[in-house]
Image: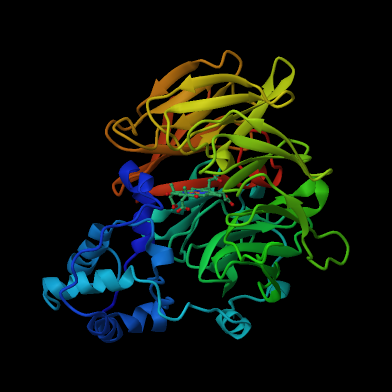
Amino acid sequence: MRLIATFLLAAAALPAATYMALDQAIPHAEAATSTSTAHALYEQQCQSCHGANRLGGAGPALLPESLGRIKRAEVRQVIEQGRPASQMAAYGAVLDAAQIDALVDYLYTPSAVPPTWSDADLRASQRIFADVATLPATPQHGADPLNLFVVVEAGNHQVRILDGDHFEELAKFKSHFALHGGPKFSPDGRFVYFASRDGWVSVYDLHNLTMVAEVRAGLNTRNLAISNDGRWALVGNYLPGELVVLDARDLSLVKRIPATGLDGVTSRVSAVYTAPPRDSFVVALKDVQEVWELSYAGTPDFVPRRIQAKDFLDDFSFTPDYRQLLATSRKAQGGQVIDLDSGRALTDIPLPGMPHLGSGIYWQRDGKWVFATPNVSQGLISVLDMQTWELIKEIPTEGPGFFMRSHENSKYAWTDVFFGPNNDAIHLIDKQSLEVAHTLRPVPGKNAAHVEFTRDGKHLLLSVWDTDGALLVLESDTLKEVKRIPMNKPSGKYNVGNKIGFVEGTSH
Ligand code: DHE
């Protein structure tokens, strides 16, 4: 079966109910066909694209670890009806209902032999598309290189590069399946790095608008970070549970570090970030109560410094000076602050529900830093004092949200209502009064989500996250729409200058 379906991409538009079902057991349908028959069906119909052992090939990996966020009904529908605008054909006429059910069950069944990804597999997957040494070292496109936007168009699994002064497209290229997390940039803004949930890491040259290299760093990846000196990429994987250090120039393998705690348990990696003033990567582990710091100063050995955490960490963010880490665990009530210098947990923080700290932002209010985070299970924004760690306010929203953004030149913090019936709303929170100053519904009935500002903060790009969606360009002060670019589920977009400056109001 040419199952080059974008199962994982389909997840990019999962409704709230699907997201809420994360980690919940999915009821199994009665399989009318035995597992061995389903395995044979897979080999006959799916393997040529999705790879032996379901590890992925031209199509995405079809392992429970990769499909966990997608409803079985949706997977069934893709097999039966195919997926428009992809190479995934419809198999409703080829397979009967029982066979399709058996196949779906099979895809959600863990492999009898745990999937592996060896050094040799990793090295063999590396592809070099361009020799950077032979490419011009200056921008070849005429646009301001620090005001470019990298836009992930999830519905088409492609990326578009926009000129941030005129909002014109400079380039468009296919990405791997289900890019997730923010693309990361080299410190000079020339190279942008992407990670897909399937473990593919790619590097693209924004000066020459060309792909440089790619490698499959794992089977299921969380995200990646780039060192502040531009030399290293660190990839955090769920499967295998490990960190992978790559040479940032061509993505060749430098080191693999199993995410094994002092207790001997090997963990999934929750997230990895760079902490520029510390010359280090900081890593949270999902199944081991440790935070790791890996220095990349000088000639690094990438041996982690282990900090004991009070809980398993899902998500985290930093204080502006990168001395402290704010962390949450989805299972815990609230969060914790960890001092990275002393390695000590400082205090608990009052955060209900499931705060999405990775999307949290900070700004100055009355001369003090405040931190605000959306919450993926409750319709509220928590605002914390970053000195006392007291809760200043819980701002009610029309539903749980995913992302938050601002800019030092904007008086508003923008946040979406990603889940529920009001997911077409965007709230603009006054950063001083902490009141919702405006609620916009850019396209009524369609999910509005994720905002990114131009470098000067005068305009912002907003996603209408729908198959028949668009990227809207708004003026920040008048809130007037000045341009609409049709797109298929545009998800995140990233301004080069804002990202390499780690500016206030953007994600890290
Ligand atoms: Fe994300 C960033 C975790 C589901 C779209 N997401 C991140 C980051 C983390 C994270 C830790 C920061 C990494 C980075 O940028 O380097 N996301 C999680 C989850 O744990 C969660 C809830 C479940 C999961 O299966 O992973 C999850 N995320 C989603 C989605 O369902 C979204 C909406 C669609 C999709 O693409 O899968 C989604 N996440 C995003 C985006 C970013 C992101 C667009 C980057 C935001 C930014 O502005 O930097």
Vertical arrangement, residue 259 with respect to residue 446, above or below: below
Nearest the eye: 23 or 233: 23
Q: Which residue is drawn at the image coordinates 65% and 65% (left, top)?
A: 259
Nearest the eye: 450 or 169: 450
Q: Which residue is drawn at the image coordinates 34% and 63% (left, top)?
A: 7
Vertical arrangement, residue 197 with respect to residue 412, above or below: below
Asked if residue 404 lies left or right of residue 273, the reply is left
Quarter of the picture containing the N terminus is bottom left
Q: Which residue is drawn at the image coordinates 53% and 34% (left, top)?
A: 404
Asked if residue 317 lies left or right of residue 181, the reply is right
Q: Residue furthest right?
A: 298
Camera sees residue 397 = yes
Nearest the eye: 503 or 40: 40
Vertical arrangement, residue 10 with respect to residue 431, above or below: below
Quarter of the picture containing the C terminus is top right
Residue 383: percent from left, percent from top: 59, 24
